Image (spheres, rainbow, N blue to C red):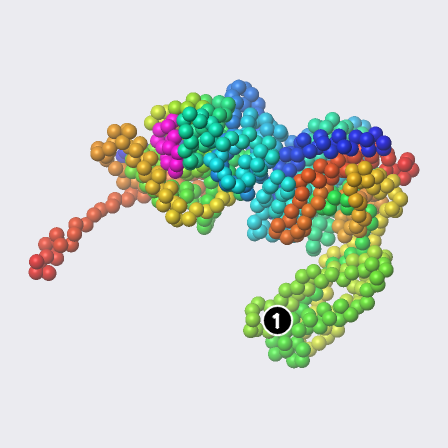
Amino acid sequence: MKDLIDALPDLRERLAARRELLLANAVMFSEIPSHTFEEADRARFMMDRLIEAGCHNVSTDELGNAAGIHQGKSGKRNILVSAHLDTPFSRSVDHAVSVSPNSIMGPSIMDNSLGLAAVATLPTLLEQLGIELNDNLVLLGSTRSMGKGDIEGMRFFLDNNQLALRAGVLCEGGTLGRLSYSSLGVIRGTIDITTKRGATGLASGGAIHILNRVVTKMLEIPLPQDPVTQLILGSIYAGTTYNTASRDAHLRFEIRSEGVGMASEIYEAIEGVVAEANAMSGTKAVLNKVGYRNNVSINFAHPLVRSARRILKELDVEEHAAPSTGELSALLGRDVPSLVIGLTKGEHRHDYNETVEIEPIFTGLAQLITLLQAIDGGLCDVDEA
Amino acid sequence: MEDFAMSTKLDKWIKSNTFHHSQFFDQLELLKQKEKTGLTISLCIPTLNEESTIGKEIVIFRSELMERYPLVDEIAVIDSGSTDKTLEVASSFGADVYFAGDILPEQGHKRGKGENLWKAIHQLKGDIICYVDADIKNIHPRFCYGLVAPLLYRPEMSYVKAFYDRPLAFSQGIRPSGGGRVTEILVRPLFSLFYPELTGLVQPLSGEYAVRRHVLERLPFPIGYGVETSHIMDVYKEWGLEAFGQTDLDKRVHRNQETLSLGKMSFGILQSFLGRMKGMGMEGNLPEMHNILRQFQAVDQQYEQICHDIVEEERPPMIDIPQYREKMGY
């Protein structure tokens, strides 16, 4: 590990000298609309990049994932390096990116065009830097990560992948220093309220009145402080105009908890609230579960986590543990030791003016490459560390 | 009969000299072809206060056309005197930046895009110079390789212009493949009247084109709006229609100009056009004007002419009509 640590400053410098390759890929990924379930164009671009970089077995699958293999010297073991392809921005959004000397701004540049660019550029960077790994790198752009996608792309890939994975590294644009080695229990759901014309009682005021009562009762559900549990009301929409009582109202929410089984308990309580609303005259209330993640984690003392922390420390980056609500759950649930790392600093995540800083990217890339070298060298295996 | 012959000639030219950038997608092949020809290529971006778009252009061009596939030998920004951070941004991403006034100082400095293009010939080294505007929001390497590629494969070609898909309303697989407003309202009618062969150029005013040095160095350069129009007329006069090529670069997203600005542009173009007519001895001796206005539409990637026979007949003043005079008792 010492040799890798000693090489970090030089590696960062050499990466900065090749920045156009990565920045151009980040910009081009960002300008390809890729709303969840509509990732085909980005997947195509990812595969083109992997083919140009000489990767093997570049292909897509039934769910549109883009994958390729950067072959290692021995090729006996495989490390997964992945980033998700989808964004919350619809095709109609202006996807133009602007580049200034210190930052890049545009929809999805942080989440997760930069992460994708890192994965797609990795083979070229390794070649240019003269870094050869023994292990194969399985490079993946995964679909259906966000919202109703319910990490279906990664789940499908892992269910059908024929290669034994030694470890996984998931790349996110932000934030540098992030280390996710545990996955929160997550349940995502929607509540759809409709009311009939001529309904009586509370429903006579329309669907918004009913949804208002549902929300009030949801907020009365006690949430434990430890294990930390949150009920997030993410989006609400209803009705059509000013002067007509709305006939429909819709809520999207997420429950997340560090406690095993806690998200399910909260969800059951919400089921009761919705059932009560559904029993009201002239009202139909429907609860749908659209996403689910188990609580899984690797230990804080796991060699993979220890190596990642040491690399961050040497790079003078403050680490912050942040449980994941994304693909990490699928990997850890299949006993693949994995981490989520962030590549740079940024702001306005999921806004149209999403922004990333350029300079810290090279620290983030140095972190990624060194971590892969550490895994490749057996420094992150439980039995060899 | 003459019109039919013209249509046939134009159809043939369009078929052989019109390209789509996707034909040149394989940049590795392009690179091999470039090495075979031994030609060098310079990319010139003329600027004036373009700080919001120049950074992205340089990053993408450097990565895709120099680092990944070294198709371009130099990328230079030639600036007219920006007061924003255009030069700082371009330089920070590795472009060579020049103030036009510093190039050939003994020739003086005039402000205008044509001035930058002209001085680029002196400053840059390439056998081919590709000009790309700096205000393109959806910049992509095709904006350069799509224009340069025909010159690498077709030695008889010297001047390759870009044209773009303009996504106006279209249906049933047919889309209007016109130029901008000034092209369709001014330049195309002028070409249709006096130089019908040049109507095959879908967007004669597009700001992106690649040209061989031996042609560029022989062209006079209006410094303002007339530069593209006069280039086309001069190249046509000297080297003929076969010197031209054009490449469909799909969509181009850029600032939309106000009508007043288009008026200024049209005025400059008219000046250049009429000046060229004078130079060709057509002043006071107008040739017979053609009645066919040639526009274009695209079906998939095939471009076809639509010919409109337009005869602008003229009525005399009503007071000259006997019946009218009789009715009114004149």
Q: Residue at x 70, y 65 (%)?
A: A191
The location of residue B249, given as percent across then percent down, is: 50, 37
The location of residue B71, given as percent across then percent down, is: 56, 27
Task: Reply yes or no: does residue B84 show up in magenta.
Answer: no
In front here: B126 or A42?
A: B126
- Whether residue B311 is visible here, answered yes or no, is yes
The answer to whether B302 appears left or right of B7 in the picture is: right
Q: Residue at x 47, y 40 (%)?
A: B164
The correct choice, above or below, for A296 with respect to B78 in the image is below
Given the image, what chain letter belongs to the residue carrying mark 1? A
Q: Describe the element under mark 1 as helix, strand or loop.
A: loop
Which quadrant does the C terminus of chain B fall into? bottom left
The correct choice, above or below, for B46 with respect to B167 in the image is above
Q: Which image quadrant is residue A72 in?
A: top right
Q: Residue at x 75, y 71 (%)?
A: A217
In front here: A219 or A14?
A: A14
Question: What range of the chain is rendered magenta?
Answer: B219-234
Q: How many marks?
A: 1
Task: Reply yes or no: does residue B225 show up in magenta.
Answer: yes
Q: Residues within 10 Å of mark 1 (few under 14, many from 20)?
A: many
The answer to whether B169 appears left or right of A170 in the picture is: left
Q: Residue at x 80, y 48 (%)?
A: A320
The correct choice, above or below, for B38 with respect to B100 in the image is above
Task: State the residue position of label 1.
Answer: A247
- Whether residue A71 is visible here, answered yes or no, is no
Q: Which image quadrant is residue A250 in?
A: bottom right
Three-letter code, disc 1: Arg
The correct choice, above or below, for A194 with respect to B66 in the image is below
The location of residue B6, given as percent across then percent down, is: 32, 33
The location of residue B203, given as percent across then percent down, is: 41, 38
